[in-house]
Amino acid sequence: MQPSADNWLPGYYDHIAEKERELADVLELLDKHELDQNTVFIYSSDHGNGPGAKFTIDDCGLNVPFIVRWPGKIKPG
C-alpha cells in the first residue's frame, strides 16, 4: 500500500527545505573562510523516498539533484 499524499508529501518538502539550508550553510562557510574562489563544490543526492521515486522510469525515478560550482571554470546558472 502506497502512503497517501497527506502522509508523505509534507515530510518530503520539509526534507528538501532542510537540505537547501544545509547547502546554503556549506556555501556560506566557504565564503566566510575565503575558499569560495578556489574550491570545486559538487553536490549530488538520490531521488528521495516518495512513492515510486526509485522504482520507476518516470522523471521522479530518473532525475537526481546535481550541482557543481567551480568559479572561473563553470558559468553560474
Image (cartoon, rainbow, N blue to C red):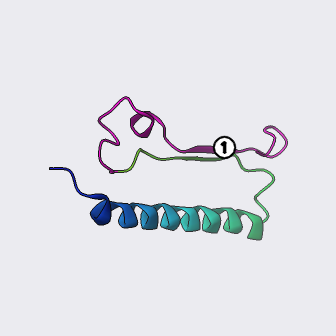
Q: Which image quadrant for residue 11?
A: bottom left
Determine whether 41 is above or below 19 in the image. Answer: above
- Over which residues does the magenta segment extend? 49-77
- Residue furthest to the right: 72
Q: Is 74 part of what is drawn in magenta?
A: yes
Which residue type carries mark 1? Answer: Val
Q: Residue at x 49, y 41 (%)?
A: 64
Foreground residue, 14 or 23? 14
Q: Where in the figure is residue 68, as x and y percent of width and height?
A: 66, 43
Q: Where in the figure is residue 55, as x and y percent of width and height?
A: 29, 35
- Residue furthest to the left: 1
Q: Is residue 46 left or right of residue 3?
A: right
Determine whether 24 is above or below 48 in the image. Answer: below
Foreground residue, 37 or 60? 60
Q: Is 60 part of what is drawn in magenta?
A: yes
Q: Is residue 52 left or right of residue 23?
A: left
Pointer 1 residue? 68
Q: Residue at x 37, y 29 (%)?
A: 57
Foreground residue, 38 or 56? 56
